Amino acid sequence: MDYTSIHIYGHLLSDDILHNIERDTNLLGNRQQDFGLDISTSAAIDYVWSSLRNDWRFFNERSGVNDPYGTRRSRDLIERLLQNFSVW
């Protein structure tokens, strides 16, 4: 699995260590209850994150080199982003 948010320099953490952390749900700090979030908060975070990813993908597909100033599409994306943050 690719870990796009983890940049490893000098091989301090190998892929097998990251895979073990990902798979072992009994590690302290790796369980849902360790984060102190109830299910509704976790579900809300998942919903907002997937919504933002879909908005970003849609924005990238629709925006092109013909829109150098980031007009309406950019404003729409930022408005949706800020609306999702205002939920918290």
Image: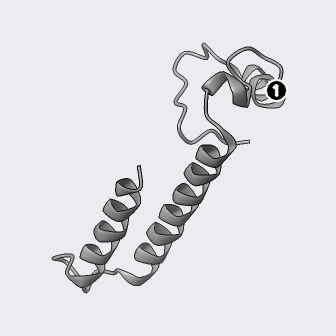
| Direction left: furthest residue | 69
Above or below, 36 relative to 13: below
Horizontal and vertical percent position of residue 78: 29, 67
Along the line of sight, the residue nearer the viewer: 7 or 81:
81
Horizontal and vertical percent position of residue 52: 48, 62
Above or below, 85 relative to 70: above
Give the residue type that dot 1 points to.
Answer: Thr
* Residue position marked by numbered label 1 in the rendering: 25
Horizontally, residue 8 falls left or right of residue 55, namely right
Q: How is the image coloured?
A: one colour
Horizontally, residue 88 falls left or right of residue 17, namely left
At 31% from the left and 61% from the top, the residue drawn is: 82
Q: Quadrant of residue 77?
A: bottom left
Above or below, 83 relative to 86: below
Number of marks present in the image shown = 1
At 74% from the left and 26% from the top, the residue drawn is: 31
At 78% from the left and 16% from the top, the residue drawn is: 27
Along the line of sight, the residue nearer the viewer: 84 or 5:
84
Quadrant of the frame with the N terminus: top right
Task: Kindly state the secondary structure of the residue where label 1 is placed.
Answer: loop
At 59% from the left and 59% from the top, the residue drawn is: 47
Horizontal and vertical percent position of residue 11: 61, 17
Q: Quadrant of residue 16?
A: top right
